[in-house]
Image (cartoon, rainbow, N blue to C red):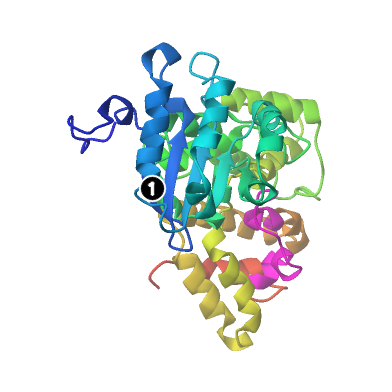
Amino acid sequence: MDTELNINHPYYDVARHGIIQLAGDDNSGRKVITFSCCRMPPSHQLDHTRLLEYLRYTLDQYVENDYTVVYFHYGLKSRNKPSLKWLQTAYKEFDRKYKKNLKALYVVHPTNFIKILWNIFKPLISHKFGKKVIYLNYLSELREHLKYDQLSIPQEVIRYVASLTYPLSPYPTCTCGLFFLFLIKDKNKGELIPPVLKQTVCYLKIKGLRVEGLFRRSASVQTIKDVQKLYNQGKPVNFDDYDDIHIPAVILKTFLRELPEPLLTFECYDHILGITSVESSLRVTRCKQIIQGLPDHNYAVLKYLMCFLHKVSMGNISQVEPFLAELHSWPVGSVPLSPQATRWPWLLGVSSRPLRVGIPLLRKGG
């Protein structure tokens, strides 16, 4: 509930739930309005007619100008789901005035229910309006379109993201979600380095530095799945039990690959690609500026990783080349990579010495 909401608000009975909120601007300066299904109480506790009136009341304040709507679908269940008749009425209620200036409707975490609804209402929905509907499977994709920090993302959605298994690799994993939650809520007893990262790196430092092809070999899919399940349940993991040094290496790579946002954040994307146009003698300085501009959590984790990879590379630089690709991995469907962006070691400075250059770059303030 909004602490500034006055009890005399004409729609206080609906507004107090925080279902509909103003959430800053998108990247084009348009107002953003969010609709969060997880905040909808059971149907017998919410007058859906009043909800529709309140939605119209809110939109009326902004529809004279361009605006954007973000719809968080997670949390819509049978107990709080409006009827199909209500949905049909809602679409008809909002005439051309509302639809004309709506520039985008982002549907976050769509399900099969949404697809079924779309097929049902497709005859009623104009082609022009349909093109404004954009489905997003990941919260991180919102960063491409909106000022993400201004969004008030419901805690229920954040917890849902933390429990997701992102199908971006052969290995089912939720470790990305745990790390995402860690970054947002600043937990883990004050530790900056997530446990899965620290444990895999420490183990590999002791037993993996001289292993040939450390980050090139695969591991048993079922074993990886079992290890990830232990991490997701908060149970201890003893890599000695598996007698395969490549298991912690794969866990570490997959952990980075599945992050909702890479360590080198989306905001750094254009800056990294821009290094190609910087004079070669100034590239190290430019890289240092980019790295020092990272959020503190990202910087700490990146430094921890680079120091470890520096140790690995002392034996053979080719050992870490497959791993470095994971540090800039962008979630599928979010940011298209150019050929230059895939050459991450080169973008740090010079292609033959990425790690030896990288360590000085990772000293903030110096």
Residue 60: image x %, image y %? 37, 46
Question: Could you tell me which secondary element the residue under label 1 belongs to?
Answer: strand
**In this view of the protein, can residue 168 be seen by the observer?**
yes
Kindly identify which residue carries mark 1.
23
Image: 272 above or below 216 = below
**Residue 363 in the figure: left or right of residue 114:** left
Q: Nearer the viewer, residue 197 or 317?
A: 197
Quadrant where the N terminus sits is top left
- The residue closer to the viewer here, 90 or 245, is 90
Looking at the image, residue 257 lies above or below residue 38: below
Q: Is residue 180 above or below residue 88?
A: below
| Residue 186 seen by the camera | no
Q: Residue at 63%, 83% (x, y): give it.
A: 277
Residue 333: in magenta span:
yes
Disc 1 crowd, CA 10 A, few/some/many (<14, 14-19, 20+): many
Number of numbered labels in the structure image = 1
Q: Is residue 97 above or below residue 158?
A: below
Left or right? Give the position of 175 relative to 3: right
Report x, y in % for residue 352: 72, 73
In the displayed structure image, the side of residue 252 where residue 163 appears, left or right: left
Residue at 72% over, 41% down? 168
Q: Give the amino acid at mark 1.
A: Ala
Verify whether residue 165 appears in magenta. no
Residue 283 vs residue 172, the one in the foreground: 172
Q: Position of residue 282 (x, y in %)?
A: 56, 85
Q: Magenta segment range?
A: 324-347
* Quarter of the image that includes the C terminus: bottom left
- The answer to which quarter of the image holds residue 13 is top left
Residue 98, x across and y down, in percent: 48, 48
